Amino acid sequence: MTSPAKLALAAISLSRLVASSPLRADSAVIIKRQAELRDEYDFIVAGAGTAGLTVADRLSEGGQYTVLVVEYGYLDGSHDITATGPDAREPFVPEYRSGTRMYNITSAPLVHTTGRPANVACGCVVGGSSAVNGMFFDRGSAEDYDSWVWAAGEDHEAEYAREWGWDNIYPFFQKSVTFHPPDERMQEEYKMTYDMAAWGGDTPIHASYPPFQWPGTVAVWDAWRTIEGVEFPKEHGDGNATGLIWCPNSIDPSDRTRSYSRRGHYDNGANERTNFHLLPAHRATKVVLEEVEGAEDRTHRAVGVHIAPRDGDMWEDGPRLVRARREVVVSAGSVHTPQVLQRSGVGPRDVLEAAGVEVKVELPGVGFNLQDHAHYTISFNYTTDLTPNPGSLASDPEFRAEADRQWAENKSGPHSSNVNGGAFLPLPFLSNRSEAIIESYLAQDPAEFLPSNAHETVIAGYKQQMKTMARMFASNRSAELEWLVSGRGGSSIIMIKIVSRGTILISPEDDGDSRGNVEPVVDWRTFSNPIDAEITAEFLKLARWFMQTEAMQKTFAPVEVSPGVDIATDEEIIAWIKSRISPSNGHLVGTASLGPKELGGVVGPDLRVHGIEGLSVADNSIMRIIPGTHTSSTAYAIGEKAADLVLRRAKANPLPETDPVELPVEEDPAEEDNGE
């Protein structure tokens, strides 16, 4: 007899034709030996991640400029990276953590929560974290990006507003991606909505929806619709990202494979440009700075980078200096960008001197202002769950066989499902205590809960951030909580506006002259500010309240499993959350942030590092305040914006042209690209 789950599956299945699109490496100018490097390039990009490859792709378009990209990770386009559905491998397995595709970094102990260290999730491969993330591809609210301008302070707001804020970054969001809307069946069956005007780009970074959603997902959405005050925006990508929103995945719908920066900004044809050189398995250990005589604002100029091999013996003469005629762009990510700057003599004086690094430009904000999306998991047992549900894949052999068949034939059915929606809720909706929480936060001494070695400029900058954060906490246009809707009884509650601030600083053992393999010290300092614990207790109360609503009880009859009803008082709730909180969603930002130097900022509105000519930053480390969204799409937009800024400078300051790059590079795809 055919199971009810199988019959339901057949009714909601969608056939799809799948075209194969293997990755290519056959025409790439991939540098494998020191001798193949030019002595000089127009631009050197340190890091081939989400933003770094975006920048390099745009700078090398047209062939006018020579570009070198240096990446510590390997060039790996294997099936493990591109596969989705049942073929996908969990990025956090030990093999990934060994440095093959993710860095093997352990944080400082989480002294304010679990007392234990935690793994630091960041990609270590050409493509960066876009090659290993969860592929949830959303944008924040307009206020999330306006906050970067507000945090610059009244004296500088107009200056930063000329380049940043929602209106200025929105066109780069649009440019950065090709959007594939849900089809008519999905719109009708799942009540998905969208607005093509929010998208409109044709860059081969793809955003799409899977053809299958679990019935329970739709039922939870319907339950939210019964609650007064919850918004359901037609489109979140236009800056209206609060309420219940549908979000695409970074998946190419033609073959249901991961769409990531290597595919969209290297295999897209950039790999055929002779003016674009990629050097994988090497580290840009430091930026070489020279003094500029008589200068006041910019006392140094970046003239190149030191490069060292990841594997094997160090070159006989030590790290190799490769010069940049125009600019060095550091795109090493929020963990390693501050490390590169600090190893170059740019950062807090006390940190550099402790490591024996000569201070070239004192910038106290480098490595401070670390933010992330902390989260914890709650669990409810759906005693009257809908069928089919995610558990049907394990409990119903017929259903599983049918699901396997649909995936094998056309990449459809339950195996294609992903998390595509969530509740992104503002603080005034979450708690009737929101005004009291904001008042308590603003009454704090800005220095009280910052690291003890925070410079006075960092403290001044956080004081301005407090005003900005309070403004967002009071707003209904800025989300504070993310609660994913997945059709399951267990789900993560994610704090997307955390007020605690951490650091990423070079180890005292890292003197700046070695191969560069001493990892920085990552200290999230999660819940170092007690306001975070106070707010997250309100989150849990909301979750319990929602599960008791008439619509949820009628459909699912949820019974709380974890933390359990015995955890009742605020003190008990906070203690339980602290014992289980994860400090990170892999969304580390803010460690080389946008802002005035006197407010602890590291880069100006043009993304150039304060005090240094020819050096800019282009990755998530520039975010002043973490947006209420998963950070991948914002990283692409930052890369697009950074490339625009760099190219504007290049056009405004022409240099003598160089001959096209023509190097006798041996082509050996099997050696060049692991897994292909």
Image: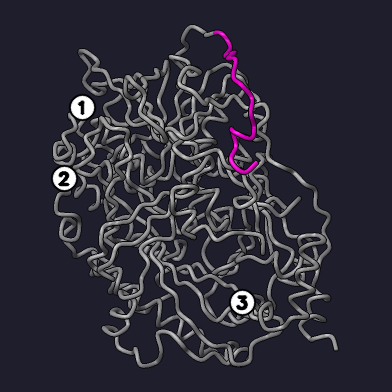
Q: Secondary structure at mark 3?
A: loop
Alpha carbons under labels 3 and 1: distance apart: 54 Å
Alpha carbons under labels 2 and 1: distance apart: 17 Å
Decide: few, some or many residues near mark 1? Use Cα within 10 Å; few <14, some 14-19, many ≥20.
many
Task: Residue under label 1, please give it.
Answer: 360
Residue 206 is left or right of residue 480, and the answer is right
Nearest to the eye among marks 2 and 3: give it. Answer: 3
Check contact, mark 2 vs mark 1: CB within 8 A. Answer: no
x 33%, y 73%: residue: 535
The disc, 3 or 1, on the residue closer to the chain's N-terminal end is: 1
Q: Quadrant of the C terminus?
A: top right
Residue 190 is left or right of residue 237, and the answer is right
Q: Is residue 209 above or below residue 265?
A: below
Residue 231 part of the magenta-drawn span = no
Q: Is residue 577 above or below residue 461?
A: below
Q: Is residue 167 above or below residue 662?
A: below
Decide: few, some or many residues near mark 2? Use Cα within 10 Å; few <14, some 14-19, many ≥20.
many
Task: Residue under label 2, please give it.
Answer: 455
What is the span of residues highlighted in magenta in the rendered image?
659-676
Please state which amino acid type lies under the numbered disc 1.
Lys
Task: Residue under label 3, please give it.
Answer: 487
Using the image as rendered, state which of residue 131 and residue 446 is in the foreground.
131
